């Protein structure tokens, strides 16, 4: 099973990268672009032999352990295949 | 008395820490490799600065999974003294041994310069022998040094005297909104904190780089006192 994890900064946490992208675009005459937020996509496979629920809960575990920092980030898990 | 210095792939301030303890304070040091699953008999563990694991994913995130960190956690739980400087601070936050997180600097730049920081608490083992209110001048070198935590955590840190170091101007004045003083935009100008027991300390600036008058045409050796207090306390 393949999963996609989308990690984003929580609302209210300053996104320095997003700000840099935004001001870069605005310099190029895309002045209407606002509120750019940069996130991270992580994809991973889980070998067969575990149920879909067990696989998903493993992904949930590694999100908490490593992939996202709960102080500043939120995550979303999607099954892609 | 013995100080253990943990080395991760990408650590680069381990020699500086050894220099302070060995050459200036006459204390034995031992390096601890990140794959080690137990610690040698030491009194203080230092996580030095650097770029562990290339800062991949988030600074300090991969280092917290190193085998040695379980041993460091156990050591801290038993009251052992743990000091994290720069990347070491980031690792301690990621590992949950200290609260909060270090975000990217507010000015979107890697900062390599001198700063002033004020000692705001003597509750930690790193500041017990120092004078509260005194100012240390030493370098910083980081891209992620902007201390952030939720409001409850901040008020707990402030209320319990867990804010150990704060960025300030030369005369010790705190100026949160002034980017020439609070250079990375940290909440409440926080440069370093301790846990509630005072045995785990993390800070972004590098006092180990301001320990000799020779290097001190700007900073002097004001960084030496905290290290002295780690071996006295």
Image: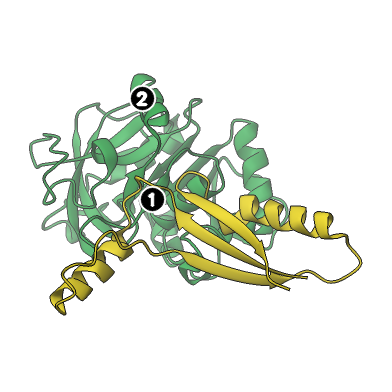
Chain colours: A yellow, B green
Secondary element at image label 2: helix
- Left or right of residue A59: residue B59: left
Dividing the picture into quadrants, the one containing residue B174 is: top left
How far across and down, in percent of the image, does residue B110 sit?
A: 26, 66
Q: What residue did someone put label 1 on?
A: B102
Q: Residue at x 71, y 58 (%)?
A: A59
| Most foreground residue, B122 or B3 | B122
Q: Residue at x 52, y 41 (%)?
A: B82
Q: Earlier in the sequence, mark 1 or mark 2?
A: 1
**Does residue B91 lie above or below A42 as drawn?**
above
Q: What residue did someone put label 2 on?
A: B155
Q: CA distance from mark 1 to mark 2?
A: 17 Å
Residue B10 visible in the current orientation: yes
Dividing the picture into quadrants, the one containing residue A12 is: top left
For the view shown, which residue lies furthest in the right direction? A49
Secondary element at image label 1: strand
Query: Badge 1 local density, few (<14 within 10 Å), some, or many (20+)?
Result: many
| Most foreground residue, B68 or B180 | B180
- Left or right of residue A73: residue B163: left
Query: Badge 2 local density, few (<14 within 10 Å), some, or many (20+)?
Result: few
Q: Residue at x 48, y 61 (%)?
A: B58
- Left or right of residue B207: residue B200: right
How far across and down, in percent of the image, does residue A14 sit?
A: 31, 51
């Amino acid at each position: 099973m393949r999963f996609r994890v989308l990690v984003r900064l929580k609302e209210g946490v300053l996104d320095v990268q997003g700000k840099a992208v935004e001001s870069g675009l605005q310099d190029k005459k895309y002045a209407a672009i606002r509120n750019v937020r940069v996130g991270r996509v992580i994809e991973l496979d889980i070998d067969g032999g575990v149920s879909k629920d067990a696989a998903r809960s493993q992904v949930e575990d590694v999100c908490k352990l490593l992939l996202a920092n709960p102080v500043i980030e939120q995550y979303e898990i999607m099954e892609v295949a | 008395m013995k100080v253990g210095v943990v080395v991760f792939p990408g650590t680069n301030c381990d020699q500086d820490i050894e220099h302070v303890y060995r050459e200036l304070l006459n204390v034995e040091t031992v390096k601890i490799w990140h794959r080690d699953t137990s610690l040698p008999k030491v009194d203080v563990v230092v996580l030095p600065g650097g770029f562990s694991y290339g800062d991949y994913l988030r600074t300090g995130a991969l280092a917290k999974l190193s085998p040695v960190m379980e041993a460091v956690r156990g050591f801290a739980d038993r009251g052992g003294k743990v000091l994290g400087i720069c990347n070491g601070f980031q690792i301690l936050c990621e590992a949950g041994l200290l609260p909060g997180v270090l975000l990217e600097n507010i000015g979107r730049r890697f900062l390599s310069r001198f700063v002033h920081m004020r000692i705001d608490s003597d509750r930690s083992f790193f500041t017990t022998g120092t004078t509260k209110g005194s100012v240390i001048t030493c370098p910083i070198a980081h891209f992620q040094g902007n201390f952030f935590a939720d409001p409850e955590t901040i008020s707990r840190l402030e209320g319990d005297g867990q804010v150990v170091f704060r960025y300030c101007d030369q005369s010790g004045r705190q100026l949160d909104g002034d980017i020439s003083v609070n250079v990375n935009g940290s909440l409440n100008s926080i440069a370093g904190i301790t846990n509630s027991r005072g045995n785990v300390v993390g800070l972004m600036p590098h006092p180990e780089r301001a320990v000799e008058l020779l290097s001190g045409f700007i900073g002097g050796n004001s960084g030496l006192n905290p290290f002295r207090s780690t071996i006295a306390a």
